[in-house]
Amino acid sequence: MVDKYHILTPRDQETLSTARMGTRMGFGKRIAVIVIDAQVYMIGDRCEPMSESNKRYPSSCGEIGWKACENIKRILDAARKKDIPIFYSQMTMAADGWDAGVYTLKRNLLQSTNWMLEGTPGWEIAPMLAPCSGDHVFMKKKPSAFFGTPLISYLNDRGIDTLIITGGSTSNCVRATVFDSSSYNYHTIVAEDGVFDRIEISHKVSLFDMDRQWADVMPTEDILAELARR
């Protein structure tokens, strides 16, 4: 397994080699694309540095998120041409936080229309990735797109065995979804440049951990090439 994120020591490399981790899972027969929480509160309303975007959108990944969303859009466009189903998760929280659970024990509830509060501008899916007719949008309350949602029933109904995971953030909701996806025995593909995070080290370590054992992390170009062959 190549250390493309430059985070491994020689001992780590030896451990990976001995344990034979990081082999390729590959694509199965029927693909779906999952877009995790690509909402305005996650990327802001314009492409600008995170330091600027955070002044209005306190959870924004700024231009990092915008660049990833450009690649997500390329994947979505290719998927629609092949009639590959697309599912969007939309992180949702009530304005008074009654449904937040222990989340607010680790992070204060943000009373802002530029956050994930249901019905606010920040809660909306980013316009550049707006769902099209035939796409599916569902709400979620927890990190994984599988937890407490109808996602797995949608996938089973369509005979899906492969998920292309995109969106944010890499270390939170993407990672949680990837672990659940693999646990349900889906071939799990992560768009390396189609996911985004606020903290660089969290992003890199999460990509490495997912690629090590739970998913194939690959660039958008490789995913598009696979879709073109379908």
Image (cartoon, grey):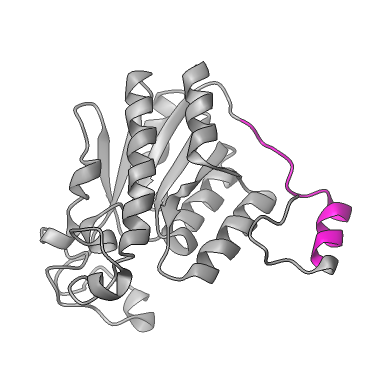
The answer to whether residue 189 is left or right of residue 91 is right
Q: Residue at x 60, y 64 (%)?
A: 205
Q: Position of residue 153 (x, y in %)?
A: 39, 34
24 in the magenta segment? yes
The single residue placed furthest to the front in the displayed view is 48
Q: Position of residue 15 (x, y in %)?
A: 84, 61
| Res 160 visible | no
Q: Residue at x 40, y 25 (%)?
A: 157
Q: Quadrant of residue 204?
A: bottom right
Which one is in front, 135 or 46? 46
Q: Residue at x 59, y 38 (%)?
A: 185
Q: How many marks?
A: 0
- Residue range corresponding to the magenta coloring: 12-26
Looking at the image, residue 115 lies above or below residue 134: below
Q: Position of residue 41 (x, y in %)?
A: 23, 63
Looking at the image, residue 72 lies above or below residue 132: below
Which one is in front, 56 or 186? 56
| Res 170 visible | yes
Looking at the image, residue 99 lies above or below residue 72: below
Q: Position of residue 26 (x, y in %)?
A: 63, 32
Q: Quadrant of residue 51?
A: bottom left
211 in the magenta segment? no
Q: Residue at x 47, y 29 (%)?
A: 224
Looking at the image, residue 160 lies above or below residue 55: above
